[in-house]
Amino acid sequence: MLPDYEIVLGRGIGEILFGIPKQEIAEILGAPNEIENPEDPERIDWEIYCYNSINCSFSFDPDNEDRLVEIVVENGYFHIGKKIRVGIRKEDILNLGVELKFGKYVIEDMRTEELPTHELISYDQVGLHLWLDDGLISSIQISPLLNEEGLLIWPE
């Protein structure tokens, strides 16, 4: 299990850093409960390691040597600066985004028949995407930062 539940934007969670290979995740967390392939055509060859015990998933991109490029957390124990976590209200998120200087954000309506209140708040400058249902964060998605040329910046 992870010793520290702090989400560090652009870096990762604890010893799980963006850019590590699949086998390192397995060394840290053990074998995943499930390995999925996304239905998104832009991510057709990606693999997603799902860990049900901590409600987290870790995505690996073959175009980046199967390195970790995305983490999704659906668990209130994980947090950003002890302030942002699953279950926080939309209004609070927007205020905290200003306070924490996340930069500009975009809110997208992502409603479907199965998820009639689904929304996405994206803070691209810091690699943060907050998925909401019923006005509350339902999952936190983070990714590495990008340089001026749009290339991924791997943490050291």
Image: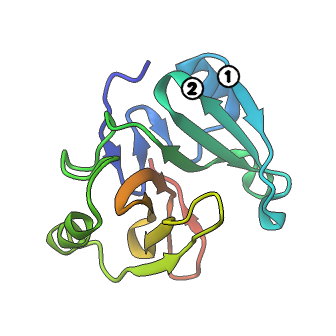
Please state the horizontal and vertical placement of residue 86, each as a whole percent of the image: 35, 47
| C-alpha gap between disc 2 and disc 1 | 6 Å
Say left or right for 12 vs 71.
left
Q: Give neighbour class at mark 2: few <14, some 14-19, many 20+ (Cα, 10 Å).
A: few
**Dots 2 and 1: beta carbons under 8 Å?**
yes
Res 89 → quadrant: bottom left
Label 1 CA crowd tier, 10 Å (few <14, some 14–19, many 20+): few
Residue 33's disc number: 1
Return the residue at label 2.
52
Q: In which quarter of the image is the N terminus?
A: top left
Q: Which residue is depicted at the point 26% across and 52% down? A: 84
Instruction: Give the quadrant of residue 51.
Output: top right
Residue at 19% x, 45% y is 82
Question: In the displayed structure, does residue 27 sit left or right of residue 84?
Answer: right
Q: In the displayed image of the protein, which residue is found farthest to the left?
A: 99
Q: Position of residue 50 (x, y in %)?
A: 64, 33
| Residue drawn at (42%, 57%) of the image | 10
Question: In the rendered structure, which amino acid carries the disc numbered 2?
Answer: Asn
Q: In this view, does 100 lie above or below 32?
A: below
* Pick the front one: 155 or 12: 12
Q: Which residue is drawn at 30% across and 79% down?
A: 103
Residue 135, percent from left and from top: 35, 63
